[in-house]
Amino acid sequence: MTTATAQSHPNIAAIKYWGNRDNALRLPVNGSISMNLGGLYARTTVTFSASKNDALSINNHAVIGKGLERVSYILDLVRSMANIKEKAEVSSENNFPAGAGIASSAAAFAALALAASKAAGLNLSEPELSRLARRGSGSASRSIPAGFVEWRVGASEEDSYAFSIAPVGHWNLVDCVAIVSVAHKKTGSTEGHAIAGTSPLQNTRVADTPRRLDICRRAILTRDFESFANIIEHDSDMMHAVMMTSNPPLMYWQPATVGIFHAVRDWRSKGLPVGYTVDAGANVHIMCLGDYAKEVETKLRELPGVSDVLVAGVGGAAQVIESALRSTL
Ligand code: DP6
């Protein structure tokens, strides 16, 4: 019996991934850039043993059906790489609340890829781990490397992986997540990616992505907050324009979401270094310079419709916490 535990952070995309050219392999139609969210993590233990079936528990609740199938798919890839047949028991915990507007799948599949490969006796390279995590959830590819990360669109399955473009200490950015809704979203990212191509705006968005990636990468590397804020808002708005115009249309924003956009732009025009970005949900990620995080958090809590604010700085790479060969006796 072999076991390993790994931990990884969720991430927030500054340039978003929306749409696949191959849904099964999760090969994206465009590259993306993100920042890992420090202090927030998924911790996953994988134990291979002689049991009959794979089993999964998340936050101490047994999961079956689609959730378990998605995990078994990654375990199957690991088993074939390691040439083993044992089934696995997977238990995963998040230290951040569900419905907080932070995708738990990114952290969960990054931790699963690392823990499962370690427990199977593999020593995968960072690109190999990123590719494996990608097969579980596209954005999970970006939770493998440290700090500020770019996921290259790639020409094939082999070269679509994420790598670090700047380390954790490079820039003191903070993500203040304004919670406006904890309701479970009706359409998840996986279904959303599958219909992205039905929007007449998607091709234009995808064709323009190299430009946005260049601006964002440069803004991060030169610590140019004004350019960073402008490009993340522009990119998020473009993705939501695609969502709203796809078939069926996806409208993730709530009135309070839009209220926050106006407030953030008003604060920035008055000199506060803030910018917003929104994933497939109603909650708003407000990125700011670390020195202003307290002030931003206080201001957000005063806005109508904001029920809570979560605060996270830049996070490191996915890590193995424990790995052991256990005797079955
Ligand atoms: C809007 O990675 O959650 O958050 O591969 O189906 O699990 P699956 O999708 P996922 O999509 C993320 C979409 C996004 C933008 C982003 O994080 O880049």
Image (spheres, rainbow, N blue to C red):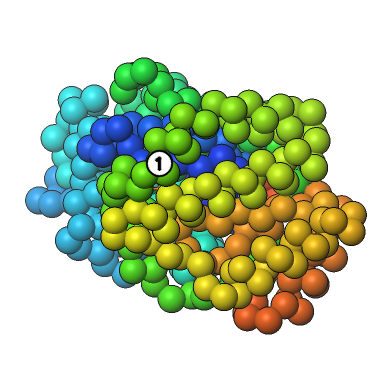
Question: Residue 127 at what x, y percent from top left?
Answer: 44, 23
Residue drawn at x 73%, y 32% is 219
**Residue in front for this viewpoint, 112 or 216:** 216
Question: Residue 180 at what x, y percent from top left?
Answer: 57, 74
Residue at disc 1, secondary structure:
helix
Q: Tag count in the figure?
A: 1
**Is residue 146 shown above or below 108?**
above
Tell me if the residue at label 1 has its CB under 8 Å from ligand 1.
no
**Residue in front for this viewpoint, 104 or 30:** 30
**Residue in front for this viewpoint, 230 or 11:** 230
Query: For the residue carrying disc 1, how many other residues have a C-alpha within 10 Å: few (<14), some (14-19), or many (20+)?
Result: many
Residue ranking furthest to the right: 271
190 vs 204, left or right, is left
What is the quadrant of the N terminus in the image?
A: top left
Question: Residue 94 at what x, y percent from top left?
Answer: 48, 60
**Is residue 259 shown above or below 222?**
below
Question: In terms of image quadrants, where is residue 191?
Answer: bottom left
**Is residue 317 shown above or below 176?**
above
**Residue in front for this viewpoint, 313 or 124:** 313
Residue ranking furthest to the left: 52
Residue drawn at x 63%, y 58% is 285
Question: Residue 216 at what x, y percent from top left?
Answer: 66, 34
Residue drawn at x 31%, y 23% is 157
Residue drawn at x 32%, y 19% is 156
Per the image, the residue denoted by label 1 is: 202
Amino acid of disc 1: Gln
